[in-house]
Image: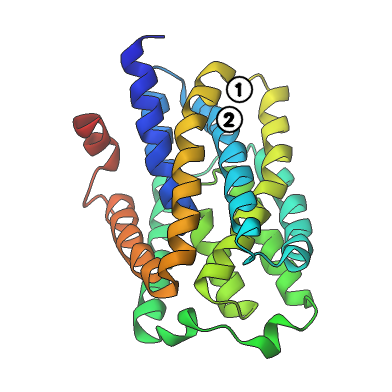
Amino acid sequence: MTVTEIILLNIAGFLAGFINTLAGGGSMITLAMLIMVGLPAPVANGTNRVAIFLQTLAATGSFRQQKVLDTRKALALGIPSVLGSIIGAKIAVDINERVFERAIGVILILMLFIILAKPKRWLKGHTEITASKVTVWQVILFFLIGIYGGFIHVGVGYFLLAGIVLGAGYDLVRANAIKVMVVLLYVPFTLLVFMLSDQVNYLYGFIMAIGNVLGAVLASRMAVKRGSVFVQWVMVVVILLTSADLFGLLDIKYLVSLIL
């Protein structure tokens, strides 16, 4: 490994840690970078989980220190996500990747419309919902999100935020805190699946994780300091970029190679 590769992995990790903590989709950057430095796609997918685990560990600790994390609700929503993620990580079926990506793109555009059409639903919590117990449909929803997260992880933050804000009644700041803890709960299990399949490069994963952790800590503090409006607009920008990439209007992997 060269000094240049170490620097590139850390920069990519920092950007991904920041974006993942505030919204989602940061793994598009890290996966592109891991592939660019020579890892096969399956190994890059597994290696990325090392950085994600340490990133979410740092972000969860930061949110908890700032007293915005509802640990009990995160655990309740995290359990079905863990079960789903194990299934997702073990999926070995043939799937048309472009159709799959376009489907995600459509969902993100719909989510963007909801954010812009009814912004107040994302900015203010609903205590009557947050105080209630986890419902059956919430368990099913987070189980399905877990399957997706275990399968590829890219963009799972969007779906978790939608479920936590619109389904569980939290504002964006507190929803982000729960989101990172849910990911923290399921990532070790998916990482183990990739480890057992010998699809993890530990050296690359730990080096990139340094950047992920720094980006996650900075983002968690900015989220609490600047509030839900700031997080909302970060989500809008990131969703637009992610959707453009999925529809072929923008090539994020190519842009990353040019910039970094």
Q: Position of residue 185 (x, y in %)?
A: 72, 49
Kind of element beneath mark 2: helix
What is the x, y in percent for residue 88? 66, 46
Q: Position of residue 99 (x, y in %)?
A: 42, 52
In which quadrant is the C terminus drawn?
Answer: top left
Is residue 73 in view from this perspective? yes
- Relative placement, left or right, of 102 versus 244 is right
- Quarter of the image holding residue 112? bottom left
Say whether marks 1 and 2 touch (CB < 8 Å): yes
User: Three-letter amino acid code at disc 2?
Assistant: Gly
The residue at which mark 2 appears reads as 46
Secondary structure of the residue carrying numbered label 1: loop
What residue do we see at 53% from left, 70% from top? 162
In this picture, residue 55 sits left or right of residue 143: left
Kindly indicate the quadrant of the structure image that contains residue 68: bottom right
* Residue found at the very far top of the displayed protein: 1
Image quadrant of residue 133? bottom right
**166, above or below 230, in the image:** below
Nearer to the camera, 204 or 219? 219
Measured as percent of width and height from the top left, residue 24 is found at 46, 55
Residue 22 circle label? none
Residue at 36% across, 9% down = 2
Q: Earlier in the sequence, mark 1 or mark 2?
A: 2
